[in-house]
Amino acid sequence: MLLSPRVQARGIQLLLGRVMSRVHKDLRFSDIPKRTEALHVETGAGPVPCTVYRPPSDTGTPAPVYVNFHGGGFVVGRPEQDDHICRYIAAAAGCVVINVDYAVAPQRHFPVPVTQAYDVTAWVAENGPAGGWDGSRLAVGGHSAGANLTAAVCRMARDRGTFSPRLQIIDSAPLDQIADPATKQSLIAKPLLSPQLMRVFTAAYVPDPAHRADPLVSPALADDLAGLPPALVITAENDRLRDEGNAYAKALEAAGVPVVHRVFEGVDHYFTHTGPVPAGKAAIDLMATTLRTALSA
């Protein structure tokens, strides 16, 4: 008897969540001081806990702000897996980082995570004086599933005319939830993402197949990308998601969106967390330096 995607997703949370969220010990940046505080933001889909990372040194003026969405296939809810990235960016880019603990499937599915991601970012943009950051100098980004949410947030902000991120970071994103994962090829025999795992993630997050072509679910299928924020798109050479990430970078550029696109060679999905360490550090530093430039302009 086959288990339902909901049951399989719950099993991944219980049995594999901790393993899937591990970070390589040499990528933890434990030498960087961490100044954090808890934050709860009310959204149209319930309260969302967040962790605020402050730059190690206080300049006396409000710092710009970066909103981060973790990965985990929309199923694993462990924002602490991005602690190393948030810590590094706060220090190297000199900005406040808001790490968002959005709801995950199968308990909460689309559109709940999108609603929470957008509402948190809108709140951050509007509440700079109270939060101690400059909400007018805002960027948003994420990793894997979190990068998908980043694309959705930027689309909603453009369409609603509410706020204008200065940069979006799209790192190893699932951008096409219609295509059969078996058609998404890797250059190595056993990549991190298997077709079956990807099917479970998609079915849990978007249980109604009719919604999978929605641009907020599958940004790569959208044909109206003009006016989106400048983008840093990171893809991994051996990742099954490489091709759709590369295609999205080209589509953004064709629509007139300024794009920096970097394909990291010889690495697989989530290398910014699992290594190899040199490539992981290089990618995280690219995020920080690109953010510093965008937010200081």
Image: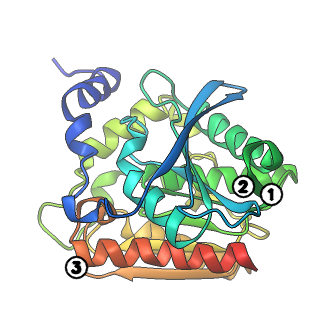
Which one is in front, 165 or 109? 165
Residue 235 versus residue 71 in the image, above or below: below
Residue 54 seen in the current view: yes
Name the residue that disc number 3 marks. 266
Residue 155 image label: 2
Task: Kindly give the residue lying farthest to the top in the view shown.
Answer: 1
**Residue at 21% from the left image edge and 59% from the top image edge:** 24
**Mark 3 and mark 1: Cα distance apart in space:** 35 Å
Residue 11 versus residue 229 in the image, above or below: above
Tell me the SS state at disc 2.
Answer: helix
Tell me the SS state at disc 1.
Answer: helix
Residue 272 image label: none
Quadrant, the C terminus: bottom right
Please say if the residues under marks 2 and 1 sit with CB atoms less than 8 Å apart.
yes
Q: Amino acid at mark 1?
A: Arg
Q: Quadrant of residue 262?
A: bottom left
Q: Position of residue 254 (x, y in %)?
A: 67, 81
Q: Position of residue 226 (x, y in %)?
A: 77, 70
**Mark 2 and mark 1: Cα distance apart in space:** 5 Å
How dense is the environment of label 1, judged by Cα within 10 Å: few (below 14), some, or many (20 and up)? some
Please say if the residues under marks 3 and 1 sit with CB atoms less than 8 Å apart.
no
Going from the N terminus, do you reach mark 3 or mark 1 first? 1
Q: Quadrant of residue 188?
A: bottom left
**Residue at 23% from the left image edge and 60% from the top image edge:** 274
Q: Position of residue 174 (x, y in %)?
A: 44, 55
Name the residue that disc number 1 marks. 158
- Determine whether, in the image, residue 187 is placed left or right of residue 189: right
Residue 258 versus residue 15 in the image, above or below: below
Quadrant, the N terminus: top left
Q: Position of residue 73 (x, y in %)?
A: 38, 43
How dense is the environment of label 2, judged by Cα within 10 Å: few (below 14), some, or many (20 and up)? many
**Residue at 39% from the left image edge and 75% from the top image edge:** 283
